[in-house]
Image (cartoon, coloured by chain):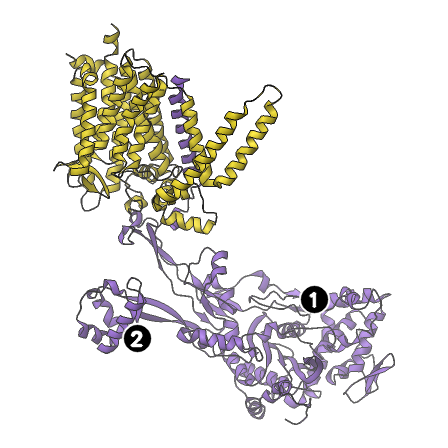
Amino acid sequence: MKKILLSSLIILIGITFLGRLSYLQIFSFSPDQVKEDPAIKAIYDYPERGYIYDRNGKLLVGNDPAYDVMVIPREVKPLDTLEFCGLLNIEKEKFIKSLKKARVYSPRLPSVLVHQLSKEDYARLQEKMRKYTGFYIQKRSLRYYDTNSGANVLGYISEVNESDLAKNEDYIQGELTGRTGVEKQYEEILRGRKGVQYIQKDRFNRDIGAYKEGALDTLPLQGKQISITIDKVLQEYGERLMVGKRGGIVALEPSTGEILSMISGPTYNPALLVGRQRSKNYTKLYNDTIANPTWDRSILAQQPPGSPFKTLNALIALQEEVIKPNTTIRCYNGFYVGTSKKGCHCGGGLRNMNSGIYKSCNAYFAGTFRKIYDKFDTTDEGMDVWEKHMKSFGLGDYLGYDLPFGQKGRIPSKEYYDKWYEDNRWSSSYIISNAIGQGEVLATPVQLANMTAAIANRGHYYTPHILKKIEGEDISNPKFTEPKHTTIDRKHFEPVIQGMADVYRKGTARWVQIPGIEVAGKTGTAENFIKINGVRTQLTDHSVFVAFAPVNNPQIAIAVYIENGYYGSRYAGHIASLMIEKYIKGEVTLKNLEKKMLEKTLEHEYAKPYSGEEFKINEYGW
Amino acid sequence: MAGNSVLKRVDWLSVLFYIALVFIGWLNIYSSTVTEAEPSIFNFSTLHGKQLFFVGASLIAIMLVLALEVNFYERFSSLFYLLSIVLLLGLFVFGKTIAGATSWYDLGFFNLQPSELAKVTTALALAKYLSDIQTDIKRRKDQLYALLILFIPAILIIPQPDPGSALVFFALIFVIFREGLPLYYLSILLLLILIFVATLKFGTLWLCIGLALLTTIFFLVKRKTFKVPIAPFVSVLVITVLFSLSVNFVFNNVFEQRHRDRFGLWLRLEKDPKKLEQIRKTIGYNTYQSEKAIESGGFFGKGFLEGTRTKGDFVPEQHSDYIFSTIGEEWGFIGTSAVVLLFTFLLLRLVHLAERQKNPFSRMYGYGVISVLFIHFFINIGMVIGILPTIGIPLPYMSYGGSGLLFFTILLFIFLRLDANRLKEGA
């Protein structure tokens, strides 16, 4: 015992040490040393963020280099103040004041001495900077907008926050990332990759040379420039028409699914969210919860689609062969559901498909809708078929476009009604409002535009998308380049399209005809309600309009949704016609319409629910 | 006289371990002190240059030690001991203060640290006393004298202040155990340490509750087989409680705040993980940085002169007490385990040598050498890798320090000289 006591202790301690060392050096060891090592500091070199161009190569978003003169007060050595101030183009007093302020903030950390030098001053200063120890120039890059439109589509960038950092290891504090729109969706393409240089530091944080002679350093990778499908001219024109109105406009190119413009009203100048005023402006925009300018109505506002929905019900009825184009239904200035009568504005009389569409007859479509359901033994079966057809137009679910946000809209299913009315205790008459785009169906403007494009294409559509080119190369993502087919046969589209063309020729939109362009469209007037102090109150109808043109070679499909704009051909119809003409002809001849749209606003309508007084709705006078 | 025959009979395996340790030590001192401005090896104004000088001085010392007659050490051991006591006392008057501790004589060209010398002389004196024909270690009085030989230098060193070095002398108790001090002294010592730690960790109350529970269980189990005397048990309980209370008192009133911090950190008395992390980075800065440096070395290390934390001087005192962290960072697990194994094998080899001595003085001195080296090895590496509280003593043969290297060398080689003579003695 005496003899082995010390030996066993020695062995025991030896093993303990080896155990602890293997724990430290083998199990706790993380190969990601460079990031954690306090002795190695990474200095990043940020590439320029990619430019964004419109479909015709016009610049939308670029960068403005900004040069800040920085100072580390502790490192400042005596200098020729007068000469330096001359180079900086500032007065001596101001210089001394700024330097003092920087010292108060921190003698050790860099502060901005002069914000955003001009390029000329920067060029002059750059060579001489070395003379002045403690000062250096920090290059920054700010987003520059060559348009005051498209704020919501383009999106904005801002500094990463805690949760971004936790989610993505590529970012470090102080870096920028896309928050909405294209900036968010194509963040990785636009951002590029930062370069890094590893510097060896001592514990006083002084540089003592490059780490491993720069073997791990990388060069920055430039962000890629992209072209988006937006037509800058059309987008800007649409936003001008939209001033003073709330709602969304989406215009598509039916043959490709490219989004020509995407307008949400009210909007804001994207330049507001850049630079030193950013945070103040953002708070202001964000806090406007009534007009909600940062909420992109073109993709987020789910509203009853109104009468444009009738065209789809007509197509389904044709496909299911429950009706023929010449089948007639009588309108009694309305129609009966049980014993209660629902109104119609078409003037009454016998309606076939053509006049049903161009006069927007409610009775005709209520009858048609019933016929679809009556074909099947149970309403469940009818519902399934109807839902399947509707969804094939991209309604009731995310469309799959390349923007970061969206809404599903709603095409009700039998399950939906089973929840409302206990099992099977509902029939087509309960859901008859869906025939005319009221009731339970909801759609966003982009869905309405897509549905119109599908009609324009006579049965298929391309998923709407915003990206056109990366570095000049056309996109080849099959998700966007291959057509999606609806469940309606091509032959059934002609009578419906004829009806839509007649809407312009002689129907509800004859007031907004465009000389020289044949347009097919459909007006809509959507009833809507809000709660004021808990009371369900009806507001002025939403003005809805969908159209495509030219009828036989569609170049544009458009959906315009103007909140509380009253009947379809009023605000929405005007705007749709103006935009179609602008896009196809490149100029506008409908000067009267244009003047009206540029001047009229709906602010008085939007003020009504907040006035606290009794108000009238659907006032006919402009 | 001795001459060639000593070189022939000296234990070359131990010498080999010694050379390896000194070489690795110097290489890492070079790495942790070299600057790009002064990469020269033979510049005595640099720390690695100075250390190289002491490596040379140690070589001369080795030759001297081996050349001297073997009787010389035994005969003059009492004198050496007295000399070192005088030197320790002299520090109170003539001592030079470095980093707050008055542990050195300024000899102009180098600073002599008498406590390093005292380790050698105390080991010699203890061996001499215990091997005396008149000493009987079973006698209380002789036990007391033997312990006194250790305590005197220890007590003189504590107020320097250098409690770490003082602790080393207590390690010489191993020699007395080897020579017949009853082992229950060791059990009592261990028990006291256990109570000390348990008191700090769990508090007196929980300690007593735990102890009461244990004894109750013990009684219930043993009652059937034989009658347990109650009185001794009760007294043990009472003594435990008293000791535990006095630990509290000493810890709170005698210890300085930094000592409390070190023990607090070691025993993880702070429960809040955030605060604990904070403490590790402030009070435990040295240990934290040295652990991190070792960890960052991984299995293969970053390579000689490639240690970023070493280069950045993140571990304080890295060339002296924390030299092991340089090895950890630059040579990885391969390097650290090699050093641990070298020490372990050297110590085991020395135990083997000590046990084969026919002369009791040689054996006892051998045990003294082993005890001193072992306690240094244990405490230093234990501290650097973060399993022991911060107690500042160097790693023999590796840490920077002239007196240290010189006297650790002399310590070892006196024993090797004695060992080289063992056959003659037997003959």
Quarter holding residue A258: bottom right
At label 2, the amino acid type is: Ser
Residue named by callout 1:
A392
Chain identifier for the purple-coloured part of the image: A
User: Going by the picture, which residue comes out furthest to the top?
Assistant: B427
What secondary structure is found at the residue carrying circle 2?
A: loop
Q: Is residue B180 above or below residue A561?
A: above
Would residue A523 be found to the left or right of residue B241 on screen? right
Asked if labels 2 and 1 touch by Cβ distance under 8 angstroms, the answer is no
Return the x and y of residue A487 as percentages of the image width and height. Answer: 72, 66
State the quadrant of the N terminus of chain A: top left
Would residue B388 be found to the left or right of residue B366 on screen? right
Give me the C-alpha separation between circle 1 and circle 2.
Answer: 55 Å
At label 1, the amino acid type is: Ser
The residue that appears at 48% across and 41% down in the rendered structure is B203
Q: Residues within 10 Å of mark 2 (few under 14, many from 20)?
A: few
Chain ID, mark 2 = A
Q: Relative to the observer, which residue lies in front, B14 or A267?
A: B14
Asked whether the viewer can see residue A329, the reply is: no
Q: Is residue A403 above or below residue A539?
A: above
Return the x and y of residue B18 as percentages of the image width and height. Answer: 27, 25
Residue named by callout 2:
A118
State the quadrant of the C terminus of chain A: bottom right
**Labels 1 and 2 within one chain:** yes
The residue that appears at 19% across and 72% down in the rendered structure is A81
Q: Is residue A66 above or below residue A359?
A: above
Chain ID, mark 1 = A
Chain identifier for the yellow-coloured part of the image: B
Return the x and y of residue B38 as percentages of the image width and height. Answer: 18, 44
What secondary structure is found at the residue carrying circle 1?
A: loop
Which numbered dot is residue B387? none
Say which label, 1 or 2, has the lower sequence index.
Answer: 2
